[in-house]
Image: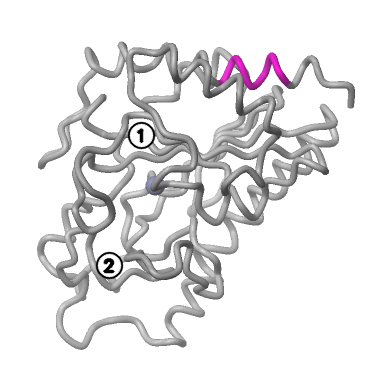
Amino acid sequence: MSDIFTLKRRSSPLLLSQPHAGIEIPASIERRIAEPAKARPDTDWHIDRLYSDMAETLEATVLTARYSRYVIDLNRDPDGVSLYPGQSVTELCPTTLFDNSPLYLGGEEPGEEEIETRRGVFWQPYHDALLEEIDRIKEMHGYVLLYDCHSIRSVLPRFFDGRLPTLNLGTGNGISADPLMMRRVENIASASPYSHALNGRFKGGYITRHYGDPANNIHALQMELAQADYMEEVLPFTYLPAKAEILQPTLQLILETMLDWGRRQPM
Ligand SMILES: [Zn+2]
């Protein structure tokens, strides 16, 4: 068992990755961060709980980060390459909160050496585990359905205008998953009670783009959810079971559609 992540290993071709679920921050870092950051407002709150029952039902493997994205962002290029060149983004080791306020107390930002250490201690083990699961599932089924679970506040002027659609599907503009599978997934989103976008503001982060490799039977999809549809977006970020129970069938149908598509492929 790792201290860096939680892994629930199961037998279907579906692999759920939850890189921003963590809330732990080592004490040596926590004492250097600004007061507003201590509430971890930019966490993908309750994302493990939201998917937990359907993952079990569908025999999906679930990899969940334990440490906060404030320590290091597991969904960023380890070399610090921007996900969206020219647009406002948070870095591998963020120095600001989503609201653009400073993450660290003055002069306490990590330097190159500390970033390198965090990459080895926190980033690498998560990605080693992810790759091991991809290889295991590929060996078992001949293909992998990687679904990267995310959620974000529905209104964030720094990153996008207005209110975010509920279901934001990202495939790196079509490079990370089979287009016919995505057409079926998008049909489910269109028929759902929720608004959606495919490769809109959120096109899939590093995990989706790096591991998605349709020619090699690895199909990766990022789902960025608007948090307003299952939780309170203000402190203390309360989970709202009644809202979540309305959203979950749509998410489960999307996962089932991916599985059904996979079963019909000649591998
Ligand atoms: Zn996220």
Q: Label 2, label 1: how many angstroms apart (C-alpha)?
A: 30 Å
The stretch of residues the image draws in magenta is 255-261
Q: Earlier in the sequence, mark 2 or mark 1?
A: 2
Instruction: Please provide percent x and percent y for residue 257.
Output: 61, 16
Crowd rating for badge 1 (residues with CA inside 10 Å; few <14, some 14–19, many 20+): many
User: Is residue 23 at least partly visible in the picture?
Assistant: yes
Going 62% across and 33% down the picture, which residue do you hit?
15
Residue reaching furthest right? 267
Q: Residue 153: image x %, image y %?
A: 23, 42
- Drawn side of residue 223 relative to residue 32, left or right: right
Question: Mark 1 vs ligand 1: CB under 8 Å?
Answer: no
Q: Which residue is mark 2?
A: 27
Which residue does the numbered mark 1 point to in the structure image?
Answer: 225
Displayed quadrant of residue 100: bottom left
Q: Mark 1 belongs to which amino acid?
A: Leu
Q: Nearer the viewer, residue 114 or 90?
A: 90
In the figure, 32 relative to 147: above or below?
A: below
Percent x, y of residue 138: 80, 36
| Residue drawn at (22%, 27%) of the image | 239
- Quadrant of the frame with the C terminus: top right
Residue 48 in sight: no
